[in-house]
């Protein structure tokens, strides 16, 4: 451990903050808070808004719902665009709402709705929003580094991320970056804030410090992750993730799974389980018999879908053993399948993609 008020730590923090900007594809500062992803979602709210403000929320799953809960907690009026689980928002619906209500201060949307695996059309939405006074806030927690997302070029006003998903670290760090017009809004925002006061945090960052104690261990680990990511190149990393996602769908569909989201996020593969299989049993079996953990569905999707996260240190051999484990589990549960064929399909795809 090193102390957080030392020249050694300041040099590390300066490098990390610079590299984070490259991954966010922004020239604006990226701030680090010691918190989980929900913390920086909340920070976006309390730094931009005032009580009774109107906001627009895209709710396409568990994480979209979270924006509504934060709005409710702070007495902000949320107009909801409710999207069926598994679908992505239609940018036209955003446009209609913005025309209907000229008072909407900000729109809140996930990039990748991790509860369903759906990817929202962020570029299209930002083209609509940037022509208005409304701010566009995106939760990029499972999207940054995984899919095209250009904060400055697309005109995204606020982007938040967290350490434990695309940054492949344990939970505990939240990241947030604001456009100049979003920083301007922070000057008049009246929602209460103390720990999440971004202006104060920015001021501390200017002397390469965090305002309170820094999560030194996680920030050191982040330094390594960022170096790895930038060495590999963001575009290469995105195509690596994409090829993993493609190899999984290509090999698991012949086993009887089907792709659940209409427009899938590359960060995770979300599949409906075969009709004769209970998804919860399948996951438990895979975990207890074959030592591989994947996620399932929540709420109405419980037992119906599986979610395979493949952000970070995932190698082609991990993918191949997952396919084998899933195939063996299906057979154990009485569903016939050709495992060798699926493994061959995935292997071939990975080789063709150069990984
Ligand atoms: C994981 C996740 C979050 C935040 O979760 P925390 O537990 O608060 O870190 C927010 N949004 C999305 C899209 C996520 O996947």
Image (cartoon, grey):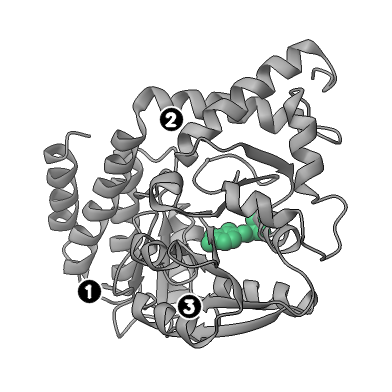
Residue 194 percent coordinates (x, y): 88, 52
Residue 245's disc is: none
Q: Quadrant of the C terminus?
A: top left
Q: In the image, what residue occupies the spot 44% across and 83% down?
A: 83
- Determine the residue positioned at 54% across, 85% down: 101
Please tell me in which quadrant of the rendered image residue 317 appears: top left
What kind of element bears circle 1?
loop
Q: Quadrant of the N terminus?
A: top right
Would residue 305 appear left or right of 248 to someone viewing this image? right
Q: Is residue 206 left or right of residue 83?
A: right
Q: Earlier in the sequence, mark 2 or mark 3?
A: 3
Q: Which residue is mark 3?
A: 60
Whether 91 is drawn above or below 190: the answer is below
**Which tag, 3 or 1, sits closer to the chain's start?**
3
| Quarter of the image where ligand 1 sits | bottom right
The relative height of residue 306 versus residue 314 in the rendered view (above or below) is: below
Residue drawn at the location 73% of the way across and 43% of the way down: 33
| Gap between marks 2 and 1 measured at Cα | 35 Å
Please indicate, yes or no, whether residue 36 appears anywhere in the rendered image. yes
- In screen coordinates, is 186 left or right of 295? right
Camera-side residue of 176 and 323: 176
């Amino acid at each position: 451990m090193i102390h957080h008020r030392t020249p050694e730590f300041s040099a590390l923090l300066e490098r990390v903050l610079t590299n984070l900007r490259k991954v966010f594809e922004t020239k604006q500062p990226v701030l680090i808070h010691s918190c989980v992803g929900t913390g920086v979602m909340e920070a976006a709210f309390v730094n931009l808004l005032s009580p009774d403000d109107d906001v627009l929320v895209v709710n396409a799953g568990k994480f979209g719902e979270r924006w509504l809960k934060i709005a409710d907690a702070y007495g902000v009026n949320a107009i909801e665009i409710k999207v069926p689980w598994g679908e992505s928002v239609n940018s036209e619906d955003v446009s209609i709402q913005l025309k209907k209500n000229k008072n909407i201060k900000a729109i809140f949307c996930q990039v990748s709705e991790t509860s369903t695996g759906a990817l929202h059309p962020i570029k299209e939405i930002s083209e609509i929003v940037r022509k208005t006074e409304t701010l566009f806030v995106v939760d990029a927690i499972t999207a940054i580094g995984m899919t095209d997302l250009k904060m400055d070029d697309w005109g995204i006003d606020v982007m938040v991320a967290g350490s434990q998903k695309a940054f492949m670290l344990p939970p505990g760090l939240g990241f947030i970056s604001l456009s100049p017009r979003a920083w301007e809004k922070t000057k008049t925002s009246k929602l209460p804030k103390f720990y999440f006061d971004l202006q104060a945090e920015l001021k501390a960052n200017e002397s390469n410090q965090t305002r309170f104690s820094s999560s030194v261990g996680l920030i050191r680990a982040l330094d390594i992750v960022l170096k790895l990511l930038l060495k590999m190149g963001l575009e290469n990393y995105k195509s690596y993730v994409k090829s993993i996602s493609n190899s999984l769908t290509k090999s698991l569909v012949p086993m009887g799974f089907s792709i659940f989201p209409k427009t899938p996020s590359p960060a995770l593969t979300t599949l409906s389980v075969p009709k004769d299989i209970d998804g919860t049993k399948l996951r438990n079996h895979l975990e207890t018999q074959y030592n591989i953990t994947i996620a399932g569905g929540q709420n109405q999707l419980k037992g119906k879908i599986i979610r395979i996260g493949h952000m970070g240190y995932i190698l082609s051999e991990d993918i191949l053993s997952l396919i084998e484990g899933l195939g063996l589990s299906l057979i154990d549960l009485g569903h016939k399948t050709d495992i060798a064929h699926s493994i061959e399909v995935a292997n071939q795809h990975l080789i063709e993609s150069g990984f």
